[in-house]
Image (cartoon, grey):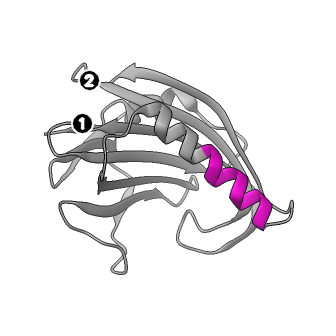
Amino acid sequence: MNDLCELSIYGVKIFHPIEWSVMINPASKFEFNEGEIKVDNLKSELSLSLRWALMKDDITPNDYISELKETFLEKERKSKGKEIYRLLDFFEKENVKGENLCFLNTEIYANHSILGVFRKREMVKSIQAIYFSKTTRRIIIATISSVKDIFELDDYMEILSTLTEE
């Protein structure tokens, strides 16, 4: 990845390519304890979603994975087999500050609106970085999603590894 610029909001910081556009949904919460912001590349059909929320209890990476798997199973059941949700990989890696991030690699075959336009059912590939803050008790999640067949995992890992909390 070439030129990256910093996005910092409420102490959550990530770098993204300068040609990507920041999008704020007025219907989404946007405060210190809970919020969401998107950075989209419409030309390449890529979306970086940055979400954060206050944790009610301490959550471990394994707790998060277990809950995600249950959510995936429930969504598949409700769709009566029309939607598919797969957790392909889970690993931990340090961010640029040496703090622990959890990474998830997923595929979802469903109707979606990753670029703000509701689309037909198709495969959405995602890589997600999750930071569990002990300081602010927030869970911070950065997700890069794409409908493209070519999913440049190394480039996206470079972006997601910049996820930090100030």
How far apart are labels 1 and 2 at the CA level?
8 Å
Q: Which numbered disc covers residue 154?
A: none
For the point 24% across and 36% down, the residue is 164
Q: Quadrant of residue 150?
A: top right
Residue 147 in sight here: no
Counting from the top left corner in percent of width and height, residue 21 is at 37, 60
Q: Which quadrant: the N terminus?
A: top left
Mark 1 in CB contact with mark 2 (< 8 angstroms): yes
Give the residue type that dot 2 points to.
Answer: Glu
Q: Is residue 50 left or right of residue 10?
A: right
Q: Is residue 20 left or right of residue 12?
A: right
Q: Is residue 33 magenta?
A: no
State the residue in front, 108 or 146. 108
State the residue in front, 141 or 78. 78
Of mark 1 and mark 2, the one earlier in the sequence is 2
Q: Which residues are magenta?
A: 69-78
Residue 8 in sight here: yes
Query: Which residue is denoted by mark 1 in the rendering?
Result: 164
Q: Which numbered disc covers residue 99?
A: 2
For the point 44% across and 22% down, the residue is 92
**SS at badge 1:** strand
Counting from the top left corner in percent of width and height, residue 102 is at 43, 30
For the point 85% across and 63% down, the residue is 82
Q: Is residue 12 left or right of residue 154?
A: left
Give the residue type that dot 1 points to.
Answer: Thr
**SS at badge 2:** loop
Callout 1 crowding tier (Cα within 10 Å): few <14, some 14–19, many ≥20: many
Magenta highlight: main SS = helix
Q: Is residue 72 magenta?
A: yes
For the point 79% across and 66% down, the residue is 79
Counting from the top left corner in percent of width and height, residue 56 is at 30, 53
